[in-house]
Amino acid sequence: MLARVPELDQLPRQTVSDVKNKWREVVRGLRETGSVAITNHAEVEFVLLDVSTYRQLVAGADAMRTRERAVLEQLADDFDRRLAVLQQPDSSQKIDAIFASGGKLVNRPKAGGTY
C-alpha cells in the first residue's frame, strides 16, 4: 500500500541557495521527511524525493495504469460483443422492424445478461 504523499504546501522547504550551499542538511532533512520542496524567490519550483518515495509513486502510477488498462479492455470486450450482435445478418431487419413498430411492443422485451 502506498504511503500518503503530503500536499505541496505541507512539505518542508529549502531555498535553491540552501540546496547549493548546505547539501548535507538538505539530504538529512530529506531522509527524515521523504521529500522537500525547493523554492526560488518564495515559489516552489521543484520537489526533491528520496528513492523510497519515488518508488512508491512509480508503483502507484503503474498500478493505476494496470487497473485502467483492465477496465478499458473490459469495456472494449463489451462493445465488441454488442457490435457483433448488430453485425449479424438479420440485425438490419430487426432494427427496421423496431423502428416500423412506432414504439408498440409485440412481444415482451428481452433483457438481462443472457440476451
Image (cartoon, helix red, strand yellow):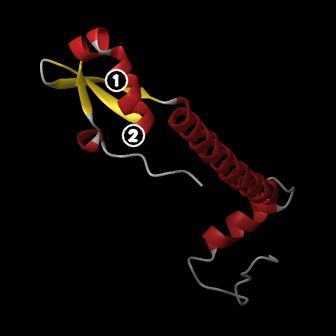
> At x 29% / y 29%, what residue is drawn?
37
Q: Quadrant of the N terminus?
A: bottom right
Please tell me in which quadrant of the rendered image residue 48 appears.
top left
Closest to the observer: 5 or 115?
5
- Height in image: 36 above or below 62? above
Q: Nearer the viewer, residue 85 or 65?
A: 65
Q: Is residue 5 in view? A: yes
Indicate the quadrant containing the C terminus: top left, top right, bottom left or bottom right. Answer: bottom right
Residue position for label 1: 26
- Above or below residue 77? Residue 40 is above
Question: Does 21 sit above or below residue 3?
Answer: above
Determine the residue positioned at 64% across, 46% down: 63
Place residue 109 in its image quadrant.
bottom right
Q: Earlier in the sequence, mark 1 or mark 2?
A: 1
Residue at screen point 80% across, 60% down: 85
Residue 34 appears in view = no
Q: Amino acid at mark 1?
A: Val
Q: Is residue 114 left or right of residue 50?
A: right
Q: Secondary structure at mark 2?
A: helix
Q: Please identify the residue farthest to the right as the structure is shown.
A: 89
- Image side of residue 16 versus residue 27, left or right: left
Q: Which mark is residue 33?
A: 2
Residue 91's spot in the image, x, y percent? 79, 61
